[in-house]
Image: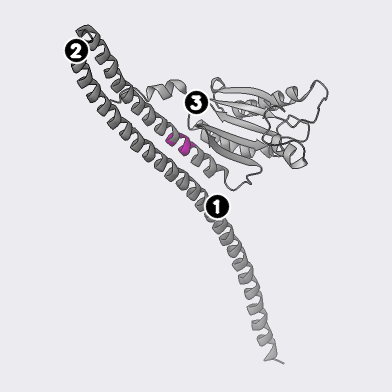
Amino acid sequence: MKLRLPLLTVVASLFLFSCVSSKKFKAEQAKNEALNTTYVNVQQTLKECTDARDAANRKNGDLQKENDNLKEQVAFLKENNTQALKQLQDLSVISASQAESIKKSLDNIGSKDVYIQGLQSAISRRDSLNMVLVMNLKGVIGNLDDEDINIKIDKGVVYIDISDKLLFKSGRYEITPQAKTVLGKVAQVLKNQPDIEFMVEGHTDNVPYRSGVLLDNWDLSVKRATSVVRILQNEYQLDPSKMAAAGRSEYKPLTDNATAEGRAANRRTRIVILPQLDQFFQLLEPQS
């Protein structure tokens, strides 16, 4: 009996130590799995951005080749036209002043060609800035479902679509507490780009709505847009002079309202990064 008691004590100690170690191991294993999931999501976002960048580079390369071909054609035509003008002038078909006027017109073609090159370069730089903005937004927002938040570039404009279920309760325009997390992440990126101007648009489905002071979907969409703008200004200190609020009601749907899924997709808040035309044209000016 005296030998059994110490033996039982040792076995019990080993059992308790094993349980504690097992719990720690499972906790560390859960942390590791969470980190792996985050890593996979970041890698996927990076791949999407890299693919988009490579596609843009290929497009720019094709445009450059086409531009070089056009330059060669213009140079060829100018040379032929110069010779033709000289022949016509020698034959007294046109006067010297007429020949000079035509020559100036042809020279203007070359000036326009230089302008087009500058324009293409400015567009390429603008697209690069938009790509960086999208990468930053996707980086801070993380792995939210595309059904809830979608960030894209369309025709040179950045759009951020946020579903209404992330921001509002059904038929309401007050921002929910959990929505502030999403808006805070978007505000984090926008605040780092102080020159950016943007518009917040409210969108609804086509189900008629009336409640209290709100007369219809127009009122609801506008109130939702202004609710988002106030949060961005008052809680995240974004410059109000860089923001605008607008309501689109049901008249800019993403898809058909015939199904519940379609109506859910159409109920959204859209943040539109407005093109900076003054900055765009500054890109065309000679760089010092």
Question: Which residue has dot 2 on it?
Answer: 89
The answer to whether residue 246 is seen in the rendering is yes
Is the C-beta separation of discs 1 and 3 under 8 Å? no
Say which of marks 1 and 3 sits in front: 3
- The earlier-in-sequence mark between 3 and 2 is 2
User: Start and end of the magenta stretch?
Assistant: 128-133
Q: Main secondary structure of the magenta part?
A: helix
- As rendered, which of 194 and 112 lies closer to the eye? 112
Residue plotted at (49% across, 36% down): 133
Q: At which x and y percent is residue 214?
A: 79, 22
Question: Which residue has dot 1 on it?
Answer: 41
Q: At which x and y percent is residue 151?
A: 57, 39
Q: Amino acid at mark 3?
A: Pro
The answer to whether residue 236 is seen in the rendering is no
Is 253 colored magenta in this rendering?
A: no
Question: Which residue has dot 3 on it?
Answer: 275
Is 129 colored magenta in this rendering?
A: yes
Q: Quadrant of the C terminus?
A: top left
